[in-house]
Each structure stands twice: as C-alpha cells, then as structure tokens.
Amino acid sequence: MPPVIEASVVRHVARLSRLALSEDEVTTMQRELSGILEHVDLVQELDLSEVPPTTHAVPLQNVLRPDEPRPGLPLEEAMRSAPDRQGDSFGVGRLG
C-alpha cells in the first residue's frame, strides 16, 4: 500500500518542527506516519461504546514516601552563598 502522507507534508511538518531531514529520512517518516494513520483508522472502526473512558491505562497509586518534618538548613549555611543578603533574607533586584 502506498504511503498515505505525501512527502511534501512531511517536509512541511519537519520545517515547522525545526528538523532537517534528508530525503531518506523523509521517506522513512512518510512510511512511519502513514502506518500510524492506518492504525488510527483501524481503532476508529471498533465499537467502543461499551468501553468506559479512561485517563490512564493502568491504575495509579502514590509511590512517594509520606511527608515527615525534619530540620532544615541552619540560617548561616543557607545564606552562605547568597550574593545579596539583607538580614535573614535573600536580596533581589527590582523588577521592571
């Protein structure tokens, strides 16, 4: 089956994406993108009316450790590399 996407479209998308593609790469992308569109067409032919919408293919769970308070850096250590210290705070320049 010939590619569905024309080479000129691949070149246009590559230019918009700031990609420099050789002619061999254009041909490869043309074939690969056409294959993706063919798969999308196959999925669109399926009756998915009984399939509930999902946001994730697998259930998610929180894998982070629980928050536990602990001491932070001492003030002097935190401020040691501050280029502009103003008392106990970092000094920043004016905006605008």
Image (cartoon, grey):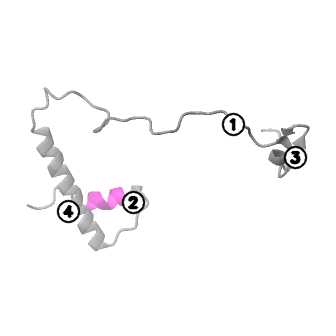
Q: Which of marks 4 and 3 is in front?
A: 3
Q: Which amino acid does label 3 sit on?
A: Asp
Q: Do the residues labelled 2 and 3 touch (CB within 8 Å)?
A: no
Disc 3: CA contacts within 10 A as few (<14), some (14-19) or many (>=20):
few
Callout 3: helix, strand or loop? loop
- Asked whether residue 19 is drawn in magenta, I would say no
Quick one: 17 or 71, which is closer to the camera? 71
Q: Mark 2 points at which residue?
A: 15
Q: Which amino acid does label 1 sit on?
A: Arg
Q: Over which residues does the magenta segment extend?
A: 7-14
Q: Residue 4: horizontal and vertical position, in percent?
A: 16, 56
Q: Is residue 25 above or below residue 59?
A: below
Callout 2: helix, strand or loop? helix
In which quadrant will I find the C terminus? top right
Quick one: 50 or 33, which is closer to the camera? 50
Callout 1: helix, strand or loop? loop
Q: Distance between the residues labelled 2 and 1?
A: 51 Å
Of labels 4 and 3, earlier in sequence is 4
Q: How far apart are marks 2 and 3 (CA)?
A: 45 Å
Quadrant of residue 74 within the rendered picture: top right
Q: Which of marks 1 and 3 is in front?
A: 1
Q: How far apart are marks 4 and 1 (CA)?
A: 56 Å
Is residue 4 found left or right of 94 in the rendered image?
Answer: left
**Residue name at image x 62 percent, y 33 percent:** 68
